[in-house]
Image (cartoon, coloured by chain):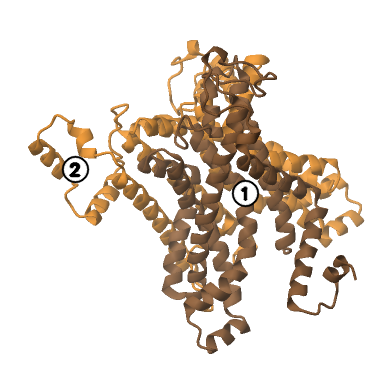
Chain colours: A orange, B brown
């Protein structure tokens, strides 16, 4: 994944690369972001054009006469050449106009704005779990290389790479909700708490705290834990694997030996010196896995009836609501690209070696 | 001289002996890795299951028996029955054909496309390289599953369209790998020698560059198989992949969802099949990487 990031301003390798000034590098970075976003727009635009659903027919209904149909077609700009339609589309999206959802008959932007905080809440909780478990697990595995903690982390990682997230969600519901009754059922809140808190941020746990409703906060949190753990498990697999390999690199270095020879405690050597040195690459790993969680959330949200963007996109898909699908895809894609770029930027800013 | 000594000889007498010896050495490394052998076993078992499905299955995968619906696992129905009384074990067995079909189709299209784009881009350089790599980057920057969803929505649900959507979203990493390999190959002396003999770029790319790129690509493809299976199952689960009554594992989980709390076997058992198969491909890929890609 990281190789995407290092490509800002692709140059043919045959030509020796001239050292570029900071201004030129920033310009190159911005240009590559702009081009990637434009590519995203082009893809969603083209998908919208090849769909076997006639957007004009969807708007006027199948009982409209030929004249009305033609008028609507011109009004929607579908008589223009493709490239002009694309420019129109980019203009609309830049103004925040993603069209109207057929399913909810509301502007897609409003729908997305309502659904996004739910996804954000789920993904953020998942990444917190991923970092809190994944980093120590990776460190332990590296320190006890070849012994049981290492094997355990390796097996957990392998399972994480092989298990379907939606199946794990269903098994989790079956086990912790139906059989053990430890976790509440699907959804973000119990029904009788629904709508009691004014949405300020849209993130229910935060809203409940802002309103001082601790009971609702705990209820929301209990609903969050199971889906977030299931989703977080997948980032634990990735983060622990990367932490382990970064740590192994560090523990081989001579400064570690020096620190030990000086009589420094093992805890300090590992958790402060070695871990401190891998903080920068770890941040990029975390940012990347946060981006991947957005993707995993599509399936998790479906299983847990979590009213986020993923559920919104799949529901719209099953109802052939193209504006909503493409709008949702665009937003998730944009956030994903943004996070990728951010992790790249953080790496360049924080790691002095990258500033050559 | 035994066959083993002949293969492991330090002074091979012929090109074929050297080649066979290398293959044998790789095989020894591979078999020494117990987990990789487990992976190979799982993958071979999957292939046999798909090939011999009529012999292994106890029932016809579509045969309904409404009197016997939603029965728990028993001697007659090893994995129980679903909402139409169909035997889940037989459906899982026949489902291996669909899984293999999807994996093979993706594995035959996406890496080939990536290989061509990557080698052309890396060998020709210049503007071709800039344009092709920019397109690759755009595709790489997308969330794969979301993009596959959007493509399936445009193409319509179905197993072939799911394959197309997965292939469209999975070629860019192969292009990147192939380009990186090509860049190191193209400046080597033997390529210059071939070029001086008057070989065309097409001939050089197809005949000399691509064969050298394949081994690292094979490793990557094997490691990606699990991801392909999981994505295809995810699309099936969302109702966008294989359509009923096809016994695709993800779609089976999706229909079993509504019976989850009382008839757990309908949804959970096909999931275990997905898990075992993708675990097998992951283990196999790890083992192959150790053999074919000693750099890591």
- Quarter holding the N terminus of chain A is bottom right
Q: Which residue is mark 1?
A: A285
Q: Residue A68: x percent and y percent?
A: 10, 36
Q: Residue B85: x percent and y percent?
A: 55, 19
Image height of B220 relative to A116, above or below: below
- Residue A105, by quadrant, is top left
Q: Residues within 10 Å of mark 1 (few under 14, many from 20)?
A: many
* Chain identity of mark 2: A
Q: In the rendered view, does B283 fall on the left or right side of A178?
A: right
- Quarter holding the C terminus of chain A is bottom right
Check residue A76 in the rendering and tell me which mark sits there, or answer none. 2
- Residue A38, by quadrant, is bottom left
Check residue A310 in the rendering and tell me which mark sits there, or answer none. none
Out of B160 and A24, give the one closest to the viewer: B160
Q: Residue B86: x percent and y percent?
A: 55, 22
Q: CA distance from mark 2 to mark 1?
A: 43 Å
Which tag, 2 or 1, sits closer to the chain's start?
2
At a point 37% along the width and 51% down the height, the residue shown is A43
At a point 38% along the width and 34% down the height, the residue shown is A317
* Chain identity of mark 1: A
């Amino acid at each position: 994944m990281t190789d995407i990031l290092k490509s800002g301003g692709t140059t043919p390798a045959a030509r020796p690369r001239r050292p570029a000034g900071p201004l030129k590098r920033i310009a190159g970075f911005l240009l590559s972001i702009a081009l990637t976003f434009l590519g995203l727009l082009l893809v969603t635009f083209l998908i919208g054009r090849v769909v076997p659903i006639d957007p004009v027919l969807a708007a006027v209904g199948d009982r409209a006469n030929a004249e009305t149909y033609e008028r609507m077609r011109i009004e929607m700009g579908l008589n223009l050449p493709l490239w002009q339609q694309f420019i129109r589309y980019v203009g609309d999206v830049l103004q925040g106009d993603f069209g109207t959802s057929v399913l909810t008959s509301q502007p897609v932007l409003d729908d997305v704005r309502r659904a996004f905080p739910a996804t954000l809440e789920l993904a953020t909780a998942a990444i917190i779990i991923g970092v809190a478990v994944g980093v120590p697990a990776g460190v332990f595995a590296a320190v006890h290389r070849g012994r049981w903690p290492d094997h355990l982390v390796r097996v957990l990682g392998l399972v994480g790479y092989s298990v379907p997230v939606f199946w794990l969600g269903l098994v989790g519901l079956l086990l912790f909700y139906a059989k053990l009754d430890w976790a509440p059922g699907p959804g973000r809140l119990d029904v009788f708490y629904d709508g009691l808190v004014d949405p300020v941020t849209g993130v229910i746990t935060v809203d409940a705290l802002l309103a001082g409703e601790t009971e609702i906060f705990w209820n929301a949190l209990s609903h969050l834990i199971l889906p977030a753990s299931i989703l977080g498990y997948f980032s634990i697999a990735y983060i622990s694997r990367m932490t382990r390999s970064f740590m192994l690199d560090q523990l081989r270095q001579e400064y570690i030996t020096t620190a030990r020879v000086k009589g420094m405690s093992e805890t300090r050597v590992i958790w402060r010196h070695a871990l401190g040195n891998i903080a920068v690459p770890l941040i990029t790993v975390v940012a990347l896995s946060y981006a991947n969680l957005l993707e995993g959330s599509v399936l998790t949200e479906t299983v847990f009836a979590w009213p986020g963007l993923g559920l919104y996109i799949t529901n719209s898909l099953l109802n052939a609501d193209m504006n909503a699908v493409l709008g949702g895809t665009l937003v998730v894609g944009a956030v994903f690209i943004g996070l990728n770029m951010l992790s790249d930027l953080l790496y360049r800013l924080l790691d002095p070696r990258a500033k050559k | 001289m035994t066959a083993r000594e002949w293969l492991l000889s330090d002074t091979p007498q012929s090109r074929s002996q050297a080649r066979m010896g290398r293959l044998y050495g790789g095989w020894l490394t591979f078999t020494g890795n117990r987990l990789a052998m487990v992976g190979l076993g799982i993958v071979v078992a999957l292939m046999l299951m798909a090939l011999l499905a009529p012999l292994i299955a106890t029932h016809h995968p579509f045969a309904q028996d409404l009197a016997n619906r939603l029965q728990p696992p028993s001697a007659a129905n090893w994995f129980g029955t679903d909402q139409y009384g169909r035997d889940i074990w037989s459906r899982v067995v026949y489902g291996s054909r669909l899984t293999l079909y999807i994996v093979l189709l993706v594995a035959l299209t996406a890496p080939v496309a990536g290989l061509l784009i990557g080698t052309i881009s890396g060998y020709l350089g210049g503007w071709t390289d800039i344009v092709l790599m920019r397109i690759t980057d755009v595709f790489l920057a997308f969330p794969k599953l979301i993009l596959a969803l959007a493509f399936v929505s445009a193409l319509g649900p179905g197993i072939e369209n799911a394959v197309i959507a997965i292939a469209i979203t999975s070629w860019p990493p192969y292009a990147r790998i192939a380009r990186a390999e090509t860049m190191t190959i193209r400046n080597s002396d033997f390529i210059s020698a071939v070029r001086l003999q008057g070989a065309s770029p097409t001939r050089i790319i197809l005949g000399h560059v691509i064969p050298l790129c394949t081994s690292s690509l094979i490793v990557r493809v094997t490691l990606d198989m699990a991801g392909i299976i999981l994505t295809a199952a995810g699309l099936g689960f969302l109702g966008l992949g294989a359509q009923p009554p096809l016994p695709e594992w993800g779609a089976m989980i999706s229909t079993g969802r509504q019976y989850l709390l009382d008839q757990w076997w309908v949804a959970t058992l096909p999931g275990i099949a997905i898990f075992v198969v993708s675990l097998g491909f992951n283990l196999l890929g790890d083992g192959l990487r150790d053999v074919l890609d000693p750099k890591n």
